[in-house]
Amino acid sequence: MTGSRAETATAHTLSLRVDEWSGHLPGQHVDVRLTAPDGYQAVRSYSLAAPADDCVIEITVQRLPGGEVSAFLTDIAMIGDELEVRGPLGNWFVWDQDDPSPVLLVAGGSGVVPLMSMIRARDEADIQTPFHLIHSVRTPQDRIYGDELTRLAAQAGGPSVTWLYTRTAPPTETRPPGRLRQNDLDDGSSRTSGATPTCFICGPTGFVEEAANHLLAAGHHADRIRTERFGGR
Amino acid sequence: MSEHRDGNALAGPLADIFTAEATTAQVRCRACGLSTTLAQLVVYGPEPGLVGRCPGCTEYVIRVATTPSGTWLDLGGATSFHFTSTVDVPIR
């Protein structure tokens, strides 16, 4: 582990140097395995948060209440510690940057991590594919990558970004706080300029299923919707 | 509230067994005949092992359990796996 920085009060981005890392696709994940002194092992999957910088990869870990692995990674692990990492994994939940189709990204909480990897890959490759991110968060303080997304969205040709607040919204926000609604996604769909978008949804299982149902109801085809469920609520 | 994940979570355990990337494979459910991408299975676990269920009929399709002696793989709920001969996705 070569770096750790707080993104929010509960989410940390860890930088890991993995010797002979051969690169990865935006949306892929790694499995991290921890072994306790008594031999007990726990494995968890974490999305890669950004394109690799040579042999350095980034994951963003949301500390879960009672989470044995996430609490260790966010609170106890220190620079210099060694972790077992397997990956890159998963070729299905990935964005193909040669595909010109507009992209609709829908994230619940830390489900934004693999979607941010897609946004950063798009930015790094200087590609103009229309991207629209809808990120559902509890409060403004829970916006992982908030400053960077605001900066990217302000650039010409940058992605457009909408935050939806479930508990507390900033004073300037006109949408009352609440769970994802059908029209939140209708608005997002209309921003992807008419062409059929590829949709990526990531977040807690219940959120992903709700969002997928809204997109299907809005007329999106099932084969253009890719989902990744983190489990939990 | 549901605690399950999906077939994306099987990528790591299956990477130890298959040489081809597994989450993009098409898998056919023995119980109902539905063909789906492995990534779209409904997955429960991780302990004592991962169980991938059919998103159509919820019957089990695949089970993977890692024990101190090695890995158990039960494909009894599937009639077939189709690994497409895709062009290599360029890694950037």
Image (cartoon, coloured by chain):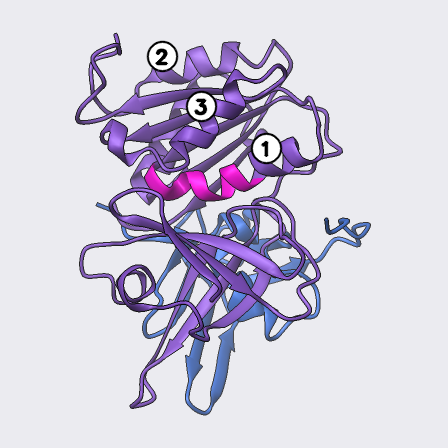
Label 3 or label 2, whichever comes before in sequence order: 3
Q: Is residue B41 visible?
A: yes
Chain letter belonging to callout 1: A
Q: Are marks 3 and 2 in contact (CB under 8 Å)?
A: no
Label 3 or label 1, whichever comes before in sequence order: 3
Q: Position of residue A167 (x, y in %)?
A: 17, 27
Instruction: Give me the residue at 38% from left, 37% from top.
Output: A208
- Residue corresponding to mark 1: A223
In the shown orientation, is residue B76 left or right of residue A22?
A: left
- Residue corresponding to mark 2: A183
B92 lies above or below B78 = above
Q: Mark 3 and mark 1, same subunit? A: yes
Task: Considering the whole magenta stretch, tell me its main secondary structure.
Answer: helix
Question: What's under tag 3, amino acid-wise?
Answer: Thr
For chain B, give the colour.
blue
Give how far apart the Cα atoms at labels 3 and 1 are.
30 Å
Mark sitting on residue A150: 3
Chain letter belonging to callout 2: A
Instruction: Give me the residue at 33% from left, 53% from top.
Output: B4
Q: Are marks 2 and 1 in contact (CB under 8 Å)?
A: no
The secondary element bearing badge 1 is classed as helix
Q: Position of residue A37 (x, y in %)?
A: 31, 88
The secondary element bearing badge 2 is classed as helix
Chain letter belonging to callout 3: A
Give how far apart the Cα atoms at labels 2 and 1 are.
21 Å
Residue depth check, mark 3 versus mark 2: number of the one nearer the observer: 3
For the record, the magenta segment spans A109-117
